[in-house]
Every structure is written in C-alpha cells, then in structure tokens.
Amino acid sequence: MTLPIKSTFSVITSSLAYEYVLPDTFITPYRVTHSSKSLEEKTIEGLDAESSLWMNSYGDPNSYFIRHDTQTVIGVKPIPLASSTSTLKVFFHARANTLSATTDIPFNNFRELYQYHYILAFYAAYRGWLIYGDTALAQIYYNEYVQGVQLMRSVMGDMPNFNPSIRGERGR
C-alpha cells in the first residue's frame, strides 16, 4: 500500500527525557534521525528482551520505539544526557487533515496530489445518491472514486527517485 502524504516532525531532545509526543497526523515512520544519524527501530518488547535495565542506560540515542497509548509517542534509547541532546527528526507517513474551512486544501496541501482533488467530489456524489436511494447512480460515482484512488496510488508509487550519487556515462 502506498501512503502518499509524508511529513516531518522535529524536536530538540532534552536531558533525561526519552519520550516525545508525535503529531495527530502521524501514521508510521519511514526514517528517524538524531544528530543527523539514522536510528534503528525497536519494539519495547525487543528492548526488554535485550536488557531489563534499558530504561537506565544513558548516552547518544541509537534506536527508537513507537508507543501507541492515549497519545502516540516516540521514545529513544539510550536516554539522552546534556552532552547528547540534539535534534530528533521523524520522517513519517501522515493522515490527511480534516477539511473544515473553504480555504482548506485537500491532502495536506501536498502539491503532487492537487490533480486528484476531483476524486473527493466523486465520493461526495456517491454518498449523496445513497442518501437519495439511487444505488445504481451511487455505484457509478463510487466506481469513479475507486478508479481515481487507484490511479493516485499507482502514480505516487512510481514517482521519480532522484539519486544524485548515481553516475551515468558523463560522470565517469
């Protein structure tokens, strides 16, 4: 499954603080860094299996975990000391913001998805015709909606990947 909306969250880690609340739009991380170094993802169970004292280790963070309770938080291990505080940056897949004003732009104003705004109208028409009881017409709009979503997913999964480190014949 392709999750098209991506976002970032940054926080300066504090001495002796190891958990930080993530934004409401957070779904799942695809990269986490501390001091520009990538951190390894772990589970709390995995950390417990490594050592029951992991919550008592201090230093430069080298791994992270995600905890979903009443709030979604990211935790780092080992716990930062004053000498190891730096920027924790979370690159994540995001859910779309709720549209509540006429000035709101769908899909979190993600420019690459502007061309797919029309899909939302098909979904609204589908729901409207269901309310009126015309299931045949509702099905037509629903099919258009599904095709649009499938197109959006396929295009987002095939976006160009620009790797400046790759060399062609001229870069030899």
Image (tube, rainbow, N blue to C red):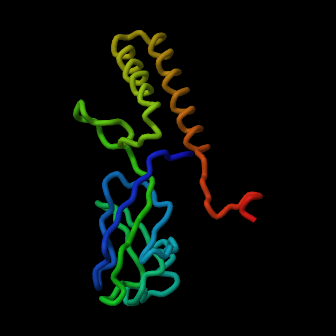
Q: Quadrant of residue 155?
A: top right
Above or below: residue 20 compared with residue 62: above
Of residues 57 and 134, the one drawn nearer to the viewer in this rendering: 57
Is 114 displayed left or right of 156 in the figure? left
Q: Which one is nearer the viewer's eye here, 81 or 67?
A: 81
- Is residue 112 shown above or below 102? below
Task: Give residue 75's position: percent from left, percent from top.
Answer: 38, 73
Where residue 157 sits, quadrant-wise, is: top right
At 60% from the left and 52% from the top, the residue drawn is 161
Query: In this rendering, would 168 be left or right of 1?
Result: right
Residue extending furthest front? 170
Residue 10 sits in quarter: bottom left
Horizontal and vertical percent position of residue 66: 41, 67
Query: In the displayed structure, does residue 142 sit left or right of residue 108?
Result: right
Total numbered labels placed on residues in the image = 0
Name the foreground residue: 133 vs 109. Answer: 109
Q: Which residue lies at the image location 64% right of the left edge and 64% below the top edge?
A: 165
Please tell me whether residue 56 is drawn above or below residue 41 in the rendered image.
below
Along the viewing direction, whichever of 172 and 106 lies nearer the viewer: 172
- Quadrant of the image containing the C terminus: bottom right
Q: Residue at x 45, y 71 (%)?
A: 33
Quadrant in the picture for the N terminus: top right
In the rendered image, residue 104, in percent from the top left (x then y), is placed at 27, 36
- Location of residue 52 in the rendering, given as x and y in whole percent from the top left corner: 44, 87
Q: Residue at x 56, y 32 (%)?
A: 151
